[in-house]
Amino acid sequence: MLFLLIYKNSSSTSTNRCAERLFQQRGDENKPPLNTTRMSTDLKKETPTRMKDIMAYSAGDGVTSVLLNSILNFAMLFYTQVIGLDATLAGLAISISIFWDAITDPIMGHISDNTRSRWGKRHPYMLLGGILSLFFFTLLWLVPDGMESEYAIFAWLMGFNLLMRTGMTIFLVPYNALGFEICTDYDGRSKIQGVRFAFGMAINILTAFSWVLFFPDNADGEIKATAEAGNYTSLIIACVVVGLLLLAIVMFATRKYAIDSRNESRDNGGIANMFKEIAHTLKDPLLRMVYIMTIVGITSAAFVGSVQIYVYEFFMEFTSVEKTIVHSSTMVAFAVGSLVGSALAKRIEKKGAILAGISLGLIGNILLCILFVGGIVSKDFAPFELFGMESSGGMLTFMGFHDLFWLGVGTMIPTSFAMVADVSEIGKIRTGKLRDGSYSAMLSFVFKASQSLGVFFSGFVLTQMGFEAAQESYSMETMEKVTMVGFLSAAIFAAIAIIPVLKYPITRKYLERIRAGEITDI
């Protein structure tokens, strides 16, 4: 791949010079002198983390995944079909809660970093946040029978959604920071993020079976399963039980990483100091590079994720079974990419893994547009029957190139999280202060803001392409435009990330030199 060839031909010497210039440009006049003795002992240690510890940590991603997927997939149906809330109000309540979730992340990062307790900085909040999330998730669905006012129902949905999202912030931000601290070696950071994202995606795939388990079609077909309140009760109970089990696993199995922090120095600047911390993180040139990579990558993924269902429905005209197969395959591709990314990072560095992910995304989306929008391959190409189901080689071809994009996204996102852990360590060496919570909180904010941007952009594009509400069919010309603009725009977004990736200077060898005290002007 062209981008990998460019990367492999770059000399390590020029990379190191680039990194040194970046640190010199930072010009932090207040930085303390580096404690090279401490670097050569504490920070230089790279103890590989056991896979069972990584798997136990990854269970925590399932706590939020099982709740969020249930909300995203079924809350709108519940409030509109069972409770009778206007769809616009239901969507508004959920959107407001997502925005609230994003802006509270930096606050939680500051609180976690400055906590002093015998149980460490992360675990007390993870336990509290996990329990609160599950509690308010349950109340979200328990709308009182006597509540008839539409605005009262709206307030109930938004209020408990905000409380549940607050609980998730309390859990998730320290959880992200804990991952930085569990794996302190360069390659291990890629591995833990890859396994974690793969585990979360596996939970996403399992939630697809909720339709079969909790919303089976009625025998007479007169009442839709999603209109029966009792079906949601079963779903809630299952989600809470699974969530509690996963929370117990991550809390118990990672308890050895809860280090007593009572003797550490504390920041007493309060909220004002929190904003200084945010400004400090944004001044870091390395962190800005990672954030830019994340913004363009997540925006691209969110954009395709929002548009692809329209492509399945109106352009490819997939059957229900085909849509299930193709959509599920994208989740599998993402999970595989998450695991492959850590292996690639070990062989060709993290920036090499990111470039590989970008290349896969570009190839998948561009070839998909050429083949299908260009009329070279049609959906009905090479029809066949398998296990009594009619399908086609066209569907398989579409799925293959479509999955290449999601394989690339799965490679990029966990690797970018691992990069933040490296940058956070360098920040600790430079200042003597641990900011894992603040760094992970800002990354979480960027992640969610990028998702919102991608969803908004997809809606704008659909409107410009001629989509109207409640319309049952569209011309092939309109759908060709949607497919081409949607998938090629995502490719362009991904291509933009090449610029900061090529400039990103941190490699395994460079980090080792910093830890050894060979580079002090950082």
Image: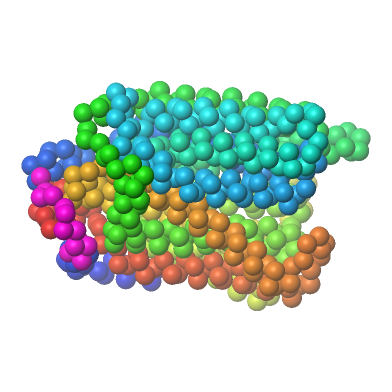
Residue 212 or residue 8, whichever sits in front: 212
Give percent across and percent down for residue 62.
Answer: 51, 35
Quadrant assignment, res 147:
top right
Side of 71 where 172 appears, left or right: left
**Secondary structure, magenta segment, majority class:** loop
**Which residues fall within the magenta stretch?**
23-35
Residue 21 x, y percent position in the rendering = 19, 67
Identify the residue at horizontal 54%, vertical 39% (top origin). 165
Look at the image and tell me whether residue 220 can be seen. Answer: yes
- Give percent across and percent down for residue 304: 59, 61
Where is residue 518 shown, x and y percent of the image? Answer: 9, 53
Quarter of the picture holding the N terminus? bottom left
> Which of the pair 397/6 is nearer the observer?
6
Number of dots carrying numbers: 0
The front one of 218 and 238 is: 238
Q: Residue at x 60, y 61 (%)?
A: 456
The structure residue drawn at horizontal position 78% and vertical position 42%, both measured from the top left corner, is 150
Way the structure is coloured: rainbow
In the drawing, does residue 439 fall left or right of residue 24? right
Is residue 215 shown above or below 453? above
Q: What's the residue at 63%, 58% (across, down)?
A: 306
Is 480 inside the magenta-drawn segment?
A: no
Q: Is residue 407 visible?
A: no
Q: The C terminus is located in which quarter?
A: bottom left
- Based on the picture, tell me whether residue 28 belongs to the magenta stretch: yes
